[in-house]
Image (cartoon, coloured by chain):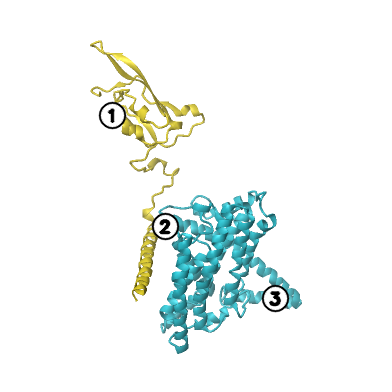
């Protein structure tokens, strides 16, 4: 008789697990406050994106127009599809020593897959992912961006 | 009181008073045809919209909400798009069968409309073997599906059609057996008499636990017979792109799509008629005041309410349950549903013979 017992137990387990699933979807069906999608163009001003949303790479500048990029090209090496190109220059400091520094941070948005590897690779936390996702333009060349602001320089104390 | 019964009655009186009998019947045929086709169109639009909204809310989304008032015109716009699209026939396809298949599926669904009682005394054809007619005609759909799969000359289509054949043939057994349980109780194959036998209580309440089991098995089996998820082996988007209608486009695809939803409606209407009392209002024993209030709701609303309740349950299944593999699908039928429904029919027969039901 044990196989009949097992048979009935299988049926019971299956039915109860299916009912558990139906309870959850029934809860979502009746509780509309749980809805996570948003009416995008209407709520453009109050858009509430998740913290980890990845829209584009930006180089952060502080109010004195200083960034934290040392031009080490770790992000360029980390990038799997050649999105980032860093042009460096050699600055001569007071002691007469040559030091590598950032000249231009070129970012090809049209190639970027928002994989976040460059942000992980950056040793000085110079770049981060911004939440802007409205990237459409009429000319592809506009998607190639220079991230460092004109006249910006390296923040004091960042090595 | 204005009811569908009085409207159809007055139309019949008007026709027979003004036309010779033969022409009056012809005009009635035409009217019924128009009624069925327009019911098809309306059902397609309403059910597709309902499905999209139900699925959206169950997946914590909003669903269609742009076209028309709160998205209600979305399905109309989709249909318009499908009508305007090119109906392509592949070069390698068997052209005649390829073009015939959607109509076979559609006509199968259309024929099933005939014995359904929509309201009190409103029935296109009160055939005395209504239940047999339904289970016979509902098997025609599989011919259309196999035809579509074979004629498409596409491996995915053929695989989907073969799976669908295996599935429908096996699930018809338990659907039939659960219908037989009710036929045993009511002692008639005529749908109007089955409803009349539920005057003092629906079979799902009067038939004790076996009726409940029969009802559950019926719902599972019709979900499988209409090829809906979790039993959508015929369509199997993830494996077979779209199964038997991979090669179909434009209006012929729309016909398959429409037939699927109309089949759901019909299956649920039959379920409501057999188990939930069709157009009969809900009565509780001797609560005369309550029963009187229930009587004031028109019978067509009772029928539609019950049918849409069952449709909602089937949609709930679709958007909750994981899909079955083809072997699991056949296991479920042959190892679980069929033995259970056979035993169920036996118990039901004993109950009916000994008169234990209310």
Chain letter for the cyan colouring in the rendering: B
The residue at the point 51 percent across, 76 percent down is B177
- Report which residue position mark 2 lands on: B58
Subunit under mark 1: A
* Disc 1: CA contacts within 10 A as few (<14), some (14-19) or many (>=20): some
- The residues tagged by marks 3 and 2 sit, at their Cα atoms, a distance apart of 49 Å
Say which chain tag 2 marks.
B
Label 3: how many residues lie within 10 Å, few (<14), some (14-19) or many (20+)?
few
Q: Is residue B299 left or right of residue B17?
A: left
Q: Secondary structure at mark 1?
A: loop
Q: Which mark is residue B14?
A: 3
Give the Cα separation between the discs numbered 1 and 3.
Answer: 89 Å
Which chain letter matches label 3? B
* Chain (yellow): A
Q: Nearer the viewer, mark 2 or mark 1?
A: 1
> Which sits in the foreground, B212 or B142?
B142
CB-based contact (under 8 Å), mark 2 and mark 1: no
Which quadrant would residue B10 be assigned to in this image?
bottom right
Q: Are marks 1 and 3 in contact (CB under 8 Å)?
A: no
SS at mark 2 in the image: helix
Q: Which quadrant of the figure contains the N terminus of chain B?
A: bottom right
Where is A97 relative to A142, above or below? above
Q: Position of residue B184 (x, y in %)?
A: 51, 82
Height in image: B109 above or below B203?
above
């Amino acid at each position: 008789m044990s196989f009949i017992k097992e048979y009935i137990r299988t049926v019971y387990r299956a039915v109860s697990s299916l009912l558990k699933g139906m309870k959850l979807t029934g809860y979502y069906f009746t509780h509309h406050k749980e809805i996570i999608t948003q009416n995008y163009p209407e709520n453009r001003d109050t858009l509430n994106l998740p913290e980890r949303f990845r829209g584009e790479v930006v180089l952060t500048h502080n109010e004195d127009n200083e960034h934290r990029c040392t031009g080490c090209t770790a992000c360029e090496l980390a990038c799997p599809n050649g999105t980032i190109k860093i042009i460096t220059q050699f600055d001569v400091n007071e002691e007469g020593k040559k030091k590598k520094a950032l000249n231009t941070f070129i970012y090809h948005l049209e190639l970027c897959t928002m994989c976040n590897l460059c942000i992980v690779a950056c040793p000085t936390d110079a770049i981060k992912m911004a939440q802007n996702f409205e990237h459409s333009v009429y000319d592809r060349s506009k998607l190639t961006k220079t991230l460092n602001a004109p006249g910006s320089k390296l923040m004091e104390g960042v090595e | 009181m204005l009811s569908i019964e009085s409207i159809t009655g007055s139309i019949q009186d008007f026709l027979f008073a003004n036309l010779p009998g033969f022409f009056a019947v012809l005009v009635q045929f035409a009217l019924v045809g128009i009624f069925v086709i327009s019911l098809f169109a309306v059902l397609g639009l309403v059910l597709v919209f309902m499905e999209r909204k139900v699925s959206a809310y169950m997946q914590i989304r909003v669903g269609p909400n742009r076209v028309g008032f709160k998205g209600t015109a979305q399905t109309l716009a989709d249909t318009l798009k499908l009508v305007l699209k090119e109906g392509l026939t592949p070069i390698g396809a068997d052209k005649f069968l390829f073009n015939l298949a959607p109509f076979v599926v559609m006509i199968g669904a259309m024929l099933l409309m005939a014995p359904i009682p929509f309201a009190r005394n409103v029935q296109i054809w009160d055939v005395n073997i209504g239940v047999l007619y339904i289970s016979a005609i509902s098997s025609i759909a599989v011919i259309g599906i196999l035809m579509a799969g074979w004629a498409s000359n596409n491996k995915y289509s053929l695989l989907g059609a073969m799976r669908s054949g295996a599935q429908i043939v096996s699930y018809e057994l338990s659907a039939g057996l659960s219908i037989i349980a009710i036929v045993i109780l009511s002692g008639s194959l005529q749908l109007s008499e089955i409803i009349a036998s539920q005057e003092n209580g629906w079979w799902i309440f009067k038939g004790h636990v076996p009726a409940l089991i029969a009802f559950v098995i019926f719902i599972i089996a019709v979900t499988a017979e209409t090829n809906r998820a979790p039993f959508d082996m015929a369509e199997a988007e993830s494996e077979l792109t779209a199964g038997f209608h991979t090669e179909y486009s434009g209006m012929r695809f729309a016909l398959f799509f429409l037939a699927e939803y109309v089949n759901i409606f019909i299956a649920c209407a039959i379920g409501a008629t057999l188990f939930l009392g069709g157009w009969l209002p809900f009565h509780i024993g001797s609560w005369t005041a309550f029963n009187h209030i229930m009587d004031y709701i028109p019978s067509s609303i009772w029928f539609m309410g019950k049918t849409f309740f069952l449709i909602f349950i089937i949609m709930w299944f679709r958007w909750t349950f994981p899909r079955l593999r083809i072997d699991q699908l056949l296991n479920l039928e042959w190892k679980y549903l069929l033995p259970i429904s056979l035993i169920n029919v036996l118990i039901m027969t004993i109950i009916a013979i000994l008169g234990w039901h209310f």
